[in-house]
Amino acid sequence: MRLWLVGVLLAGFAVSGSAVLFLAGFSSNVDRGGAWGVARVLPLSLAGDAVAGEARAGEAARQVLEIVTSTTTYRFDVEVAETDRQKAVGLMFRRTLAPMTGMLFPYDEASDLSMWMRNTYIPLDMIFIRVDGSIHRVEANTEPHSETVIRAGAQVTAVLEIPGGEAERLGIGAGDQVVHRHFRTAGR
């Protein structure tokens, strides 16, 4: 005779202010004199979705941003991270980012801005933009989850994050012009 006992264990863990659910299956094979033990532990991490849901609760405003290259103008649908919280969360925990979308991180004062990829699941292109809207440089295909600091290397007032590889695919690079209301008023 076999006796199976399946238990469900719900444990709250402080992981970035969210909970993680574990399903634990316990089994005992009485016929074979087996000891009680954990058959399997299946982490169903809700941390990413919980934090992403929290980030979406304070979701950034969506706006159109244009990038003018030597051959064409591209229109991007971007979220604008205006609050400190929106800037801190950015695109963390996102599993996808559609083409021609992204997030703009505008700042009032020009500085040598820096970014990182902590808790970011997808590669991104980081476009560092000067006060006049000209692109200083592109950091292409940044490494997901990396805590390496990525610096602008010049005085900039914004960073635009778009899907990894998008800048190269579209031919966007240093010297191209970003058109957005931020660049008319930054630094004034």
Image: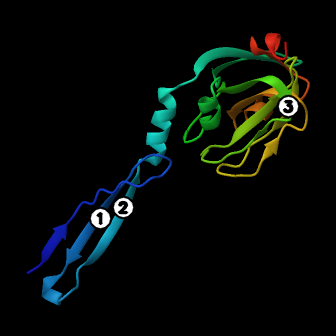
Q: Are marks 2 and 3 in contact (CB under 8 Å)?
A: no
Q: At label 1, which amino acid type do we have?
A: Ala
Tell us which disc is closer to us: 2 or 3. 3
Question: 107 or 29, which is in the foreground?
Answer: 107
The disc, 2 or 1, on the residue closer to the chain's N-terminal end is: 1
The residue lying at 20 percent from left, 66 percent from top is 6
Q: Are marks 2 and 1 in contact (CB under 8 Å)?
A: yes
**Residue 180 in sight here:** no
In the picture, which quadrant includes the N terminus? bottom left
What residue is shown with label 3? Answer: 111
Local SS, label 3: strand
The residue lying at 85 percent from left, 37 percent from top is 152
Local SS, label 1: strand
Q: Position of residue 108 (x, y in %)?
A: 78, 21
Decide if residue 15 is on the left or right side of residue 142: left
| Measured Cα–Cα span from mark 2 to mark 1 | 7 Å
Q: Position of residue 27 (x, y in %)?
A: 22, 74
Q: Position of residue 65 (x, y in %)?
A: 71, 16
In the picture, which quadrant includes the C terminus? top right
Q: At label 3, which amino acid type do we have?
A: Ser
Where 8 falls versus 163 (above or below)?
A: below
Decide if residue 56 is on the left or right side of residue 126: left
Q: Crowdedness of circle 1 by 10 Å Cα count: few (<14), some, many (20+)? A: some
The residue lying at 59 percent from left, 46 percent from top is 121
- Residue 24 - label: 1
The disc, 1 or 3, on the residue closer to the chain's N-terminal end is: 1
What residue is shown with label 2? Answer: 42
| Measured Cα–Cα span from mark 2 to mark 3 | 45 Å
Q: At label 2, which amino acid type do we have?
A: Leu
Decide if residue 119 is on the left or right side of residue 184: left
Local SS, label 2: strand
Decide if residue 99 is on the left or right side of residue 26: right
